[in-house]
Image: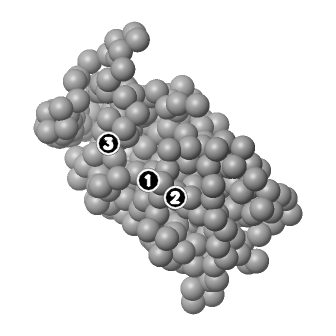
Amino acid sequence: MSVRKFLVPVSGSESAAGALRAGLLLARMWNAHLEVLHVSPGPQGITPYLGEGVSSVMIGDMMTAAEREDNARIGGLLELFARATEETGIPVGPPLRGANEPSASFLIMTGAEERLVAHRARLADLTVVPHPLAGEDVAAAEALHAVLFDSGRPVLLAPVLPPPSIGSRVAVGWNGTAHAAAALASAMPFIRQARAVRILVSDEYSRPGPGAEDVRDYILHHGVEAEIAAFMPRDRDTGAGLLAAAEEFGADLLAMGAYSTASRLRQLILGGITRHVLEHARIPVLMHR
């Protein structure tokens, strides 16, 4: 089991910094390729603002302004990419066949961001997305949910501040669901080389399915010993309890299923474990749905 390609969708320089640093760290860690993707909306980006009474001159002005703004955004992202790859010493260019070294590339596409990000993510081992609160970037949250719901692949939520390490101490949030099992499978490359692994369980979090002891046995088949720890909700919030337990363990990676107990819409309205983790995590979180 290995990881060979990472994807990092970026929209603005402020929100991209942490995710880009995390992606480069992973590329170095796995001698893998990092593809940084920016999706420009193109002319369709101004479509929501068009309506009756909008003249062709106004449309032209809006398109020119949107293009100018996007070019400035791309310029900032390219500068950030060049600076980060130079500081980390990671070569820029396509990966060489058979080469056992990291590499990075920057891809610009035009179209619907959610659709294109999901499509590119389908052929990435892991997609690293900016934290939704980094730079208060709405596009970061949309990219995250596009990968979760429309790629069939795992996503790594990067913390706002770049982490010094990822995957040396892995916490597994286990509730017995298929989503948790998918997250566990995606995290196995990290688990196999981690210094410590802890399975986090809670009665409030648990659903019908295999128990923590079964997970420990499964991980042991991969040659890794894991411990089991129960956690309690914090202020009646299970998500807060899960994050607290992961941080108390000193985890630099939390693996968990996403939206496994409620729909995204319901969690957005009423709150939920996934929503709490997305909003408050200060460590990298690997999610699968």
Reading the chain from its start, which is encountered first: label 3 or label 1?
3
Q: Residues within 10 Å of mark 1 (few under 14, many from 20)?
A: some
Q: Residue at x 57, y 78 (%)?
A: 241
Tell me: 159 left or right of 220: left
Reading the chain from its start, which is encountered first: label 3 or label 2?
3
Residue marked by disc 1: 168
SS at badge 3 = helix
Residue 257 location, quadrant: bottom right
Between marks 3 and 1, how big is the CA–CA gap?
13 Å
For the N terminus, the quadrant is top right
Q: Residues within 10 Å of mark 3 (few under 14, many from 20)?
A: many
Between marks 3 and 2, how big is the CA–CA gap?
19 Å
Disc 2 residue type (three-letter) = Ala
The circle drawn on residue 196 is 2
The mark tally for this picture is 3
Residue 267 location, quadrant: bottom right
Which color scheme does this rendered protein use? one colour
The circle drawn on residue 221 is none
In the figure, 240 relative to 75: above or below?
A: below
SS at badge 1 = loop
x and y, in percent, of residue 123 in the image: 54, 25
Mark 1 and mark 2 in contact (Cβ < 8 Å)? yes
Which of discs 3 and 1 lies nearer the camera? The answer is 1
Residue marked by disc 3: 25
In the figure, 147 relative to 250: above or below?
A: above
